[in-house]
Amino acid sequence: MDAEAEFRDYISAFNRGDTGAYGAHYADDVILVIADHTELRGRQAFFDFYSGIRAGTERTIEVVSVVAREDLIAAELVSEFLATRDLPDFPSGPMRAGDRLLIDSFVFYDLEQGRYRRIRAATHRRVFRPAAGPAHD
């Protein structure tokens, strides 16, 4: 399987919440830097962080475009977060049940021996869509 197909399989596993499948793509000492605000180190840090995200949202990632080579993958991804409950401390800002947040990101995956060693994500655009109903404060 080529690097792009493997990447698309990784995103599919991530969308399903299949930690075994998406975690297999990470080097043991993987590092993720999200918009210079959050840095995660190691697989378990990823699992812990994203299990917290999944606890209050339904998240899906769409691959807009991807360029892959042996040592690097560059992708534009759109993540949609649907709040399933009120989330006053959500990492991207407070959300109420039913709110949607779309984040368009550019992400670079450095590969080492076929696994993601370092991931850097930068936000290009955010779109917040409040749930229908009473206005938010």
Image (cartoon, rainbow, N blue to C red):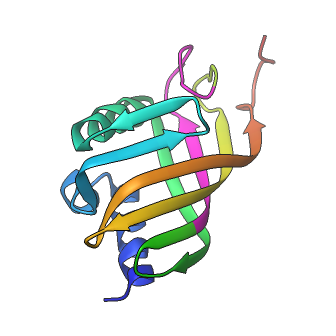
* Residue in front for this viewpoint, 76 or 82: 76
Where is residue 78? Give x, y as percent: 63, 57
Q: Is residue 137 above or below residue 46?
A: above
Q: Is residue 49 above or below residue 16?
A: above
Where is residue 67? Give x, y as percent: 57, 78
Image quarter hosting the C terminus: top right
Name the residue located 78 percent from the left edge and 18 percent from the top edge.
Answer: 134
* Residue in front for this viewpoint, 85 or 128: 128
Q: Is residue 103 left or right of residue 37?
A: right
Where is residue 49? Give x, y as percent: 36, 32
- Residue extending furthest bottom? 1
Q: Is residue 20 above or below residue 125?
A: below
Q: Is residue 72 left or right of residue 28?
A: right
For the image shown, how many numbered marks are present on the structure? 0
Magenta stretch in the rendered image = 75-92
Quarter of the image for residue 48 reads top left
Name the residue located 65 percent from the left edge and 39 percent from the top edge.
Answer: 100
Image quarter hosting the N terminus: bottom left
